[in-house]
Amino acid sequence: MNDMNGIERNVAGMSRRFLLGAGLYISARNFGRNCRGYLRRMAEIRSTGAATSETSYYGAFENLMNAVGRQLKPRVIANRQIRNQGAGQPDFGLYPQAQMRGVRAGGYGSRAGARGD
């Protein structure tokens, strides 16, 4: 738990906002809160001793990306394990709110994410 205290001190001392890229900013307070939750969840998963080297942590990462995405304008959502759209199967896709218009509620859209990994 000493590591978490050090991380919290470092996050608390950061500037008032972060540039996420392309002119998108998030407040340092919200970013710090989101990062602390993400790191805590990662530690919980690791402490089980049953985690895989990568995919066990996808849920925690998706939650972090969605928490940050809710605070952006336009809102951005992360979707994990999206289908292959010609360049392999990405782990995640990031979808800006404007791209979500026209997709049937409760149905599957045919649009590729604005960003993929």
Image (cartoon, rainbow, N blue to C red):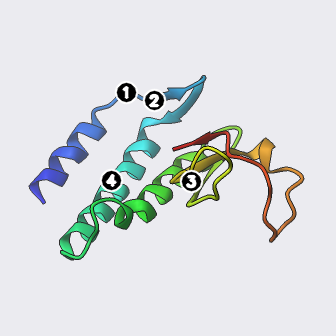
Name the amino acid type tagged 2: Phe
Name the amino acid type tagged 4: Arg
State the quadrant of the N terminus: bottom left
**Residue in the picture at 75% in, 46% down:** 97
For disc 3, the marked residue is 89
Please rate how many residues cluster around mark 3, counting C-alpha atoms within 10 Å: few if below 14, some from 14 to 19, many from 20: few
Q: Position of residue 60 (x, y in %)?
A: 41, 61
For disc 4, the marked residue is 36
Q: Is residue 108 above or below residue 88?
A: below
Task: Kindly state the secondary structure of the residue where label 4 is placed.
Answer: helix
> Which one is nearer the viewer's eye here, 105 or 13?
105
Q: Position of residue 7 (x, y in %)?
A: 21, 45
Task: Kindly state the secondary structure of the residue where label 2 is placed.
Answer: strand
Sequence-first tag of 2 and 3: 2
Q: Is residue 71 above or below residue 108?
A: above
For disc 1, the marked residue is 15
| Mark 2 and mark 1 residues within 8 Å of each other at the beta carbon | yes
- How far separated are the C-alphas under marks 2 and 3? 30 Å
Labels in figure, total: 4
Closer to the camera: disc 1 or disc 3?
3
Please rate how many residues cluster around mark 2, counting C-alpha atoms within 10 Å: few if below 14, some from 14 to 19, many from 20: some
**Residue in the picture at 61% in, 50% down:** 70
**111 sits to left or right of 31:** right
- How far separated are the C-alphas under marks 2 and 1? 7 Å
Sequence-first tag of 4 and 3: 4
Q: Is residue 38 above or below residue 105?
A: above
Sequence-first tag of 2 and 4: 2
Name the amino acid type tagged 1: Ser
**22 sits to left or right of 3:** right
For disc 2, the marked residue is 18
Task: Kindly state the secondary structure of the residue where label 1 is placed.
Answer: loop
